[in-house]
Every structure is written in C-alpha cells, then in structure tokens.
Amino acid sequence: MIRVFASVLGVLAFAVGAAGLVSRYLPIDNEFILVVAAASPYLAIAGVIAMILFALARRWVLTILAAVLCVVMVGVQLPRFIGPENAGVPSVAVRVLSANLGLGEADPVAVVQSARNSADVVVLQEMTAGLAAAMSGAGLDATFPHRVIDPRPQAAGIGVWSRYPIVSSAPIEGYQMPMLSARIRVPDVRFDPTVLAVHLAAPLVQPLDDFTNDYERFPGTLREVAKQAGSGAVIVAGDLNATYDMRPFRRLLDEGYRDAAEQVGAGMTRSFPSTVPGQPWRRPVVGIDHVLVRSCVATSAGTVSVPGSDHRGLLTTIEIPVDPTASYPDV
C-alpha cells in the first residue's frame, strides 16, 4: 500500500515538475501557462520530490526519469547563476537604475537618494506628474541635469534622467504604454549609446491580448533600435512584465540582446512584489523588471529597495566599449 501511495504521489509531483519545464517553451496564450511558466524555477522541487517518492516505492525506471527531469530543469536555470563575463576591450562603466514607481506612490526622497548614490542613468516607470515634480524638488534634476520624461496618470508615465547629455530622443508608438528612446553622450565613448525606456503591458492586470500584442511587436522595435544605433551600444530598461522563463521574453534575446542579470550570473533578480512595512510575509518572487544590453556588457546586477512601490528597482553596471570598431592587441 505504501508503494502504491508513494507511486501515485510521485506521478503527481512528476507531472507538476514536467508542466513547469514544458511551460517555458509554450506561447503565452492563457493565464494558466503564464502563471506556470513564471513559477517554473520553483516547480523544479517537484521533480526532486518525485525522484525521492519513486525511489521509496522502488520504481527504478520512474526514478531515473525523475532524475533526468531534475537535471534538465537545473540545466536550464544554471546559466543564470554563472558569471559575470568580461568586456574584453577598453570600456566605460555606466550605472543604470530602472525602477517602477508603483502608480506614482514611491517615496520621492528615497528614489532621489538611491539614484544619486548609485546611478548615472535612471529609467522610471509609472511616473505621475506629481511624483516627477516631487523628485525634481528633492534634487533629481540637480544630480541628473539631462532628462526626457512623459509623466502620466496611474501606470502610464515614463522617463529617463541622465548625468550625461541626452543628444536626441523620441517616443516609440504602438504600445499600451509610452516608450522612450534616448541617445546619450558618454565621455570617451566614440558611438553614443541608446537607452530605451520600456513598460510593457501587465498580463494579469490588463487583458492578456495587450501583453501578447506588445510582445509580438517588441522584437521588431528592438531590431529597429539596434539598426539606428549602428555600432553604438543599446540599453533597454524597464518593467517588461515577464520573467526569463517565459518564451515571449526569451524571444527578445534572438535580436542580439542579452539579459543583464543572466549575463552577470545574478540569478532570478526577484523584483516583484516588493516587501512592504507591516507585511513581512510578502517577498519578491518573480523577476519582471529587466535590463537588456546589446553591443555592451553588463558586469553587475541586483535589486534595490524602492519605498512606496510594489516593485524593487534593478541596478546594473554596464561596460560601454570605447570604440567597438577598433582592433586591440591581446592582453
């Protein structure tokens, strides 16, 4: 009886683990696949449980199958924990802070202090006009004198602040929420890097079709931005409302981009939901805020607190090549 009970539980656990693995490669066409794909790193434990239960039941073929499932699930996650990579050429470090401001409810003084202490370029989402004014009053404009912003009510506002001159900027049309492209002039860098500030549709808040449409359109935007950047670096920062384990997100990397957190081996960089006072049980469980890089290399990535917001911020250091077209002697 114990063998039968362990076998049944093992089959159920194996099915859960396998569903987590398979969901990573399916299109997100319903909320169930969305949730399972987001949870897939955690569902790997189900494979371990299945292996143990099959071994207790002395179902050796099933034990081997569960072991293979565990190896595969660990294998698909392992690259996110190995790094960082080396730029390999002379470069200039640029620190980028991306933060969702939680419907404009974030603490403006805390945001300004975090940016002043840690960033060269700041990309902010869900920025209202009132919060933009409050951050300016708290000294954000003094530290970051160059900006291109589009404040709007609720979740729609977005903006870029920079210590470096912004030499050109433009809105990107066709998405559920505003998107901004800004080219910045970094000292000693031959080709001006492009910063793309992004906030894609949230699938469990907005209709799933909005999320799907944004992700169907976004690879084309990334190609166009890369084309316009030429030899210059591209930094994409913002709330992409998808985890690394979702197929639509990983399709973005087919355009020659890298996820900064994966490149440096920072793991899952859980950014949502953030911990709030009085709710110690609430912890970040998914990483939906991202920085993507092209023609440059991320060397550090980690989350930071954004008091008042339901997201943690994502702080990255990115090495921008001084001249990617130059030939350098081997070091």
Image (cartoon, rainbow, N blue to C red):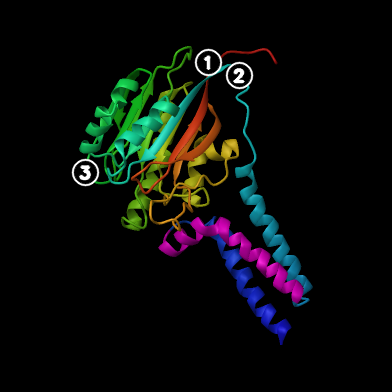
Ranked by sequence position, the earlier of labels 1 and 2 is 2
The label number, if any, that marks residue 89 in the structure image: 2
What residue sits right under mark 3 in the picture?
153
Q: Distance between the residues labelled 3 and 2?
A: 43 Å
Marks 3, 1: nearer the viewer = 3
Can residue 172 be seen? no
Q: Give the spatial CA distance, label 1 vs label 2.
A: 8 Å
Query: What is the magenta range?
Result: 29-56
In front: 139, or 75? 139
* Disc 1 residue type (three-letter): Val
Q: In which quarter of the image is residue 111?
A: top left
Label 2 amino acid? Val
Residue 61, above or below 78:
below
- Judged by its main secondary structure, the magenta piece is helix
Q: Is residue 260 above or below residue 242?
A: above
In three-dimensional space, the C-alpha distance between marks 3 and 1, rounded to whole angstroms, equals: 39 Å
Image position, residue 274 (x, y; %): 42, 49
- Quarter containing the N terminus: bottom right
Where does residue 324 sit, x and y in percent of width and height?
55, 18
- The residue that disc 1 covers is 322
Secondary element under disc 1, as helix, strand or loop, is loop
- Mark 3 residue element: loop
Q: Can residue 240 be seen in this view?
A: yes
Give whichever of discs 3 and 2 has the lower sequence position.
Answer: 2
Q: In the rendered structure, are the residues bearing label 1 and label 2 in contact, judged by CB atoms less than 8 Å apart?
A: yes
- In magenta stretch: residue 39: yes
118 shown above or below 128: above
Three-letter residue code for mark 3: Pro
| Horizontal and vertical percent position of residue 151 | 24, 36
